[in-house]
């Protein structure tokens, strides 16, 4: 049975953590409700505008006789129109939100150069430089690599666990930090 490892370490002045600062929409339900409200308002006040219809000549009867343009024709589609507009707006809002979140997750610098620099630092057995590179990079990759390096440093000092147990612990930390960084919504 694999043992659970704690991937969160208390932050001290010497051990400043790396955070990706990648937020996201916490509840898609709220987005859908807001998009529905906007869709209904658009349906009623833009598509249903009397200027889009022929109005009966009698002042007593304000019935909409027939559409005179495309907006009026879409309004005649009925209750399905706000549902379709809601779906369209929800897709647009969530795509823009994901684009912003992924842009933040990338970090501050070039990810390929960051990985090359970390590899070079590790080849020279310079964990401090690799951790410093992670702090400068930020983003998801920087946070995941930083958490893994912290666990490696901890396992390096451990004299009780076998090599296989240490590797399993580092892998669990890596998987846990990847999940915590990528499971935004």
Image: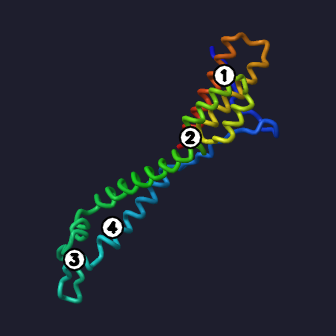
Residue hosting label 3? 53
Question: Disc 2 versus disc 4: distance between alpha carbons?
Answer: 45 Å
Q: Is residue 13 left or right of residue 179?
A: right
Question: Disc 1 versus disc 2: distance between alpha carbons?
Answer: 20 Å
Q: Earlier in the sequence, mark 4 or mark 3?
A: 4
Q: Is residue 145 above or below residue 160?
A: below
Q: Earlier in the sequence, mark 1 or mark 2?
A: 2
Q: Identify the residue shown where x is 60% and y is 45%.
A: 108
Q: Earlier in the sequence, mark 2 or mark 3?
A: 3
Question: Disc 2 versus disc 3: distance between alpha carbons?
Answer: 56 Å
Eye-nearest disc, 2 or 4: 2
Residue hosting label 4? 43
Relative image position of residue 38 (x, y in whole percent): 41, 64
Residue hosting label 1? 123
Eye-nearest disc, 3 or 1: 1
Q: Which quarter of the rendered picture does the N terminus lie within?
A: top right
Q: Identify the residue shown where x is 20% and y is 72%.
A: 69
Between residues 51 and 79, which one lies in front from this camera angle? 51
Eye-nearest disc, 2 or 3: 2
User: Do the numbered discs 2 and 4 sit on residues whose CB atoms are within 8 Å?
Assistant: no
Q: Quadrant of residue 184?
A: top right
User: Do the numbered discs 4 and 3 sit on residues whose CB atoms are within 8 Å?
Assistant: no
Q: Identify the residue shown where x is 26% and y is 79%.
A: 51
């Amino acid at each position: 049975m694999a043992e659970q490892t704690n991937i969160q370490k208390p932050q001290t002045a010497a051990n400043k953590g790396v955070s990706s600062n990648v937020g996201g929409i916490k509840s898609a339900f709220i987005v859908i409700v807001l998009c529905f409200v906007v869709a209904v308002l658009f349906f009623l006040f833009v598509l249903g505008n009397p200027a889009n219809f022929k109005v009966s000549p009698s002042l007593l009867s304000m019935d909409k006789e027939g559409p005179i343009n495309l907006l009026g024709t879409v309004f005649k589609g009925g209750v399905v129109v706000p549902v379709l507009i809601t779906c369209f707006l929800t897709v647009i809002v969530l795509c823009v939100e994901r684009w912003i979140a992924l842009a933040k997750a990338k970090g501050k610098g070039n990810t390929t150069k960051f990985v090359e620099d970390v590899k070079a630092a590790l080849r020279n057995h310079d964990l401090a430089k690799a951790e410093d590179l992670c702090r400068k990079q930020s983003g998801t990759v920087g946070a995941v690599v930083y958490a893994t390096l912290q666990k490696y440093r901890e396992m390096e000092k451990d004299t009780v666990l076998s090599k296989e147990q240490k590797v399993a612990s580092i892998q669990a930390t890596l998987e846990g930090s990847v999940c915590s960084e990528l499971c935004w919504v």
